[in-house]
Amino acid sequence: MIQSNENIIRNRPGLTLKETFDLYVKAVQNSDLEGLFTIVSKSEDFFFLTTRGKLIDRLGYYEFHKEWFSETGWEMPVDNTEVYEKGEFGYTRAVFHYREKRPQGETYVLDSYFTLIFQKEDGMWKVVADICTPIGDDSGIKNK
């Protein structure tokens, strides 16, 4: 199957931080691991702080997303985006609404603040840190 260039998710020089963030969200929502990692820094200093407080490096971030993206039955709308950009650094803060249908008929719900810290690398905005903070009750199981 041939994809049009519109559907290919790739970071590129010249994008604003907001445009790069939108690509990040699109890559996640489409389970596009290759596209996502055009937006993630190659730096060894990269880190991901999970909702449970676990600190993960770049390789762990890759493995986390590889496993997650192989799953089905989930969605993650995003809203309340704040974008701050100054020079070579910037951040975005948004609310990610994770929803997953469980085999038992329940829906797992996790609303979290995601703060992504970006740095310019080779003329492109790249995520150097991903900090996920759950909002409210983190038990996550809802009957719907």
Image (tube, rainbow, N blue to C red):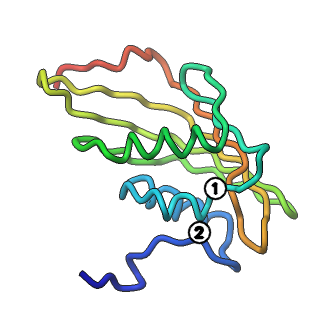
Residue at 65% over, 44% down? 58
In front of the other: 63 or 78: 63
Mark 1 Cα within 10 Å, few/some/many (few <14, many 20+)?
many
Q: For the residue labelled by badge 1, is the local secondary structure a helix, a strand or a loop?
A: loop
Task: Give the position of the N terminus as an image quadrant.
Answer: bottom left
Per the model, the C-alpha gap separating discs 2 and 1 is 14 Å
For disc 2, the marked residue is 19
> Where residue 65 sits: x, y (%)?
46, 44
Kind of residue sitting beneath label 2? Glu
Tell me if 130 is positioned left or right of 4 in this view. Answer: right
Answer above or below: position of 30 versus 71.
Answer: below
CB atoms at circles 2 and 1 under 8 Å apart? no
Residue 140 falls in which quadrant of the image?
top left
Residue at 77% over, 46% down? 44
Residue at 55% over, 19% down? 52
For disc 1, the marked residue is 40
Tell me if 101 is positioned left or right of 8 in this view. Answer: left
Q: For the residue labelled by badge 2, is the local secondary structure a helix, a strand or a loop?
A: helix
Mark 2 or 1, nearer chain start: 2
In front of the other: 63 or 49: 63
> Where residue 136 sits: x, y (%)?
48, 18
Kind of residue sitting beneath label 1? Val
Q: Which mark is residue 99?
A: none
Tell me if 50 is positioned left or right of 143 in this view. Answer: right
- Mark in the foreground, 2 or 1: 1
Residue at 12% over, 21% down? 104
Mark 2 Cα within 10 Å, few/some/many (few <14, many 20+)?
few
> Where residue 102 sits: x, y (%)?
19, 27
In front of the other: 106 or 84: 106
Task: Give the position of the C terminus as an image quadrant.
Answer: top left
Answer above or below: position of 10 versus 83.
Answer: below
